[in-house]
Image (cartoon, rainbow, N blue to C red):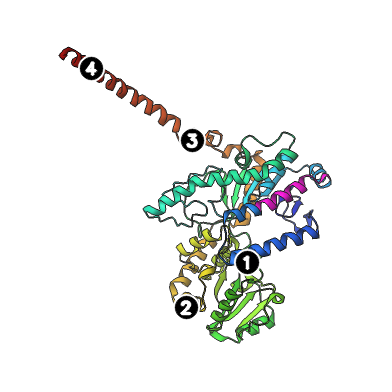
């Protein structure tokens, strides 16, 4: 039996490919809390659109996850249910530290699924040379100038501090709900306890870098061939002829644009292009004073995969979420990235570096810049060519991502864990891993004779000076 732990839903299911065998067990804090949380996030959404994404906001988000975690682990009914199921393995959401605490409490081996790129988790000791592997949130590519490498070094020094601040938010939860108390190594120890790490990325989009035996790349799990669109929507798209259409979505958490001037500029920019524009937007939130041009259509939900696989799609305007970019790669569609928060800034850097598209920060958007950037992406054949090349790379992998992940899960189950995949470096103190103890010893060994020579020479000079006197 497998337990899949996500955020904010816990899903338990027997490990089988038959969909009818899945058992879903949902847990929620109730409508009142959800309403309060959504209100907080709506305000955060406004800050994102104003370009005010910062680490303090991220820590507040982690505070919400910690509160949810405390309530979950304190719910004796759900915890007893999970303990009585006797799962063989847990697949957890590695972004949420609560997932690791829950797995530790249940005493079950676990596989960590990280929803982003390789540079997210800090403590799993991937070999990451700072000269060409960008640190999380650095917004760098793998081709760095001298100053870029200096910035990368600086971010690498800050990253452990950030992880420690995150763990402090969850440490009290671990103290209250783990019988053995929080692990001495904190979040680092919990992350290194995973039998396997699966990353939602792929080298069609990811920068090449060294991996470890306990890492597997399974980016593209949601990718699939497109289905036929509803007839009415397909007819509307066809009415724009060879100009085609553009898909716009800023992610599942941003269903509207709450900054009036930005919305006006976006609409004005779309009105300047001949393409149809399909925008995922909560129509009830649309301001009545803003007129919609005839080429713009709002839908509360978009069949993004089916739209990106349509023969007349020309461009994908996205916030830069990892799944969105992988879908664009799969279907070979150029992108215009408008990153808002979190890993999206790093993601769009990768997309640009791979030639998949261009980026505009929300605070820089004007109707002129938006329309000219769209025209550049549509008229310069290099972007479409790069998108199709990345699509070929992604699709030509010998094992599809879903099958790749299931094979590795089976391997972990049949081998009794992933201890054989982990190097000794995971158990070494940081100063041993970086040979600092050896460097100290060598420094002492070299400085000792030099100090001795200096002392002898000084004594000899003093003796000569005394004889002269």
Q: Which residue is drawn at 63% across and 56% down?
A: 402
Q: In this view, does 462 lie above or below 92?
A: above
Is residue 349 something that shows in the picture? yes
Find residue 352 and report its horizontal and vertical position in percent. 47, 64
Query: Which of the labelled discs sits on residue 372, or is there none?
Result: 2
Q: Which of 315 and 138 is in front in this view?
A: 138
Image-based side of 462 in relation to 345, left or right: left
Secondary structure under badge 4? helix
Q: In this view, does 5 lie to the left or right of 121?
A: right
Q: Are dots 4 and 2 in contact, CB under 8 Å?
A: no
Magenta residue span: 61-76
State yes or no: residue 63 in magenta: yes
Gap in Å between the C-alphas at discs 2 and 1? 25 Å
Q: Quadrant of residue 231?
A: bottom right
Label 1 sits on residue: 46
Relative height, residue 325 to residue 73 (above, below): below
Q: Distance between the residues labelled 3 and 1?
A: 43 Å
Query: Which comes sooner in the sequence, label 3 or label 1?
Result: 1
Residue 228 magenta: no
In space, the residues marked 2 and 3 are separated at their CA atoms by: 50 Å
Q: Kindly identify the residue that appears in the image at 46 percent across and 56 percent down.
A: 140
Query: Sequence-wise, which precedes: disc 4 or disc 3?
Result: 3
* Residue at which label 3 appears: 433
Disc sitting over residue 339 in the figure: none
User: Where is mark 4, residue-wise?
Assistant: 462
Element type at marker 2?
Answer: helix
Please tell me how crowded label 2 is: few (under 14), some (14-19), or many (20+) other residues with Cα within 10 Å: some
Query: Which residue lies at the image location 84% right of the left edge and 46% below the top edge?
Result: 77
* Quarter residue 61 falls in: bottom right
Classify mark 1: helix, strand or loop. helix
């Amino acid at each position: 039996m497998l337990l899949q732990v996500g955020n904010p839903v816990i899903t338990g299911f027997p490990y089988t490919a038959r969909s009818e065998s899945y058992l879903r067990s949902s847990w929620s804090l109730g409508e009142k809390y959800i309403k309060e949380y959504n209100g907080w996030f709506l305000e955060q959404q406004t800050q994102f659109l104003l370009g005010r994404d910062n680490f303090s906001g991220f820590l507040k988000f982690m505070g919400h996850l910690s509160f949810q975690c405390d309530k979950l682990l304190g719910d004796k009914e759900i915890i007893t249910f999970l303990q009585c199921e006797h799962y063989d393995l847990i697949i957890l959401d590695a972004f949420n530290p609560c997932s690791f605490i829950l797995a530790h409490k249940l005493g079950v081996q676990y596989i960590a699924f990280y929803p982003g790129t390789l540079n997210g988790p800090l403590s799993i000791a991937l070999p990451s040379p700072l000269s060409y592997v960008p640190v999380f949130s650095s917004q760098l590519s793998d081709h760095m100038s001298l100053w870029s490498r200096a910035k990368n070094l600086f971010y690498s020094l800050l990253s452990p501090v950030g992880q420690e601040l995150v763990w402090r938010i969850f440490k009290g939860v671990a103290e209250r709900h783990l019988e053995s108390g929080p692990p001495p190594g904190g979040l680092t120890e919990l992350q290194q306890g995973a039998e396997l790490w699966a990353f939602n990325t792929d080298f069609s989009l990811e920068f090449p870098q060294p991996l470890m035996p306990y890492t597997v790349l399974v980016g593209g799990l949601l990718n699939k061939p497109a289905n036929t669109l509803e007839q009415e929507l397909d007819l509307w798209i066809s009415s724009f002829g060879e100009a085609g259409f553009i898909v716009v979505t800023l992610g599942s958490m941003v269903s509207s644009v709450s900054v009036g001037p930005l919305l006006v500029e976006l609409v004005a920019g779309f009105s300047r292009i001949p393409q149809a524009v399909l925008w995922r937007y909560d129509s009830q939130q649309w301001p009545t004073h803003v007129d919609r041009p005839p080429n713009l259509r709002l839908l509360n939900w978009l069949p993004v995969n089916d739209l990106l696989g349509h023969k007349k799609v020309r461009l994908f305007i996205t916030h830069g979420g990892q799944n969105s970019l992988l879908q664009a790669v799969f279907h070979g569609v150029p992108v215009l990235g408008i990153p808002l928060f979190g890993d999206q800034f790093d993601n769009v850097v990768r997309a640009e570096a791979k030639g998949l598209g261009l980026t505009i920060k929300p605070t820089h958007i004007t109707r002129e810049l938006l329309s000219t950037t769209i025209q550049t992406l549509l008229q310069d054949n290099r972007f479409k060519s790069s998108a199709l090349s990345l699509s070929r790379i992604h699709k030509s992998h010998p094992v599809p991502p879903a099958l790749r992940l299931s094979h590795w899960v089976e391997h972990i189950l049949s081998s009794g864990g992933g201890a054989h995949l982990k190097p000794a470096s995971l158990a070494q103190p940081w100063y041993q891993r970086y040979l600092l103890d050896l460097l100290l010893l060598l420094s002492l060994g070299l400085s000792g004779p030099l100090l001795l020579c200096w002392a002898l020479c000084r004594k000899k000079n003093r003796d000569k000076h005394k004889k002269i006197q």
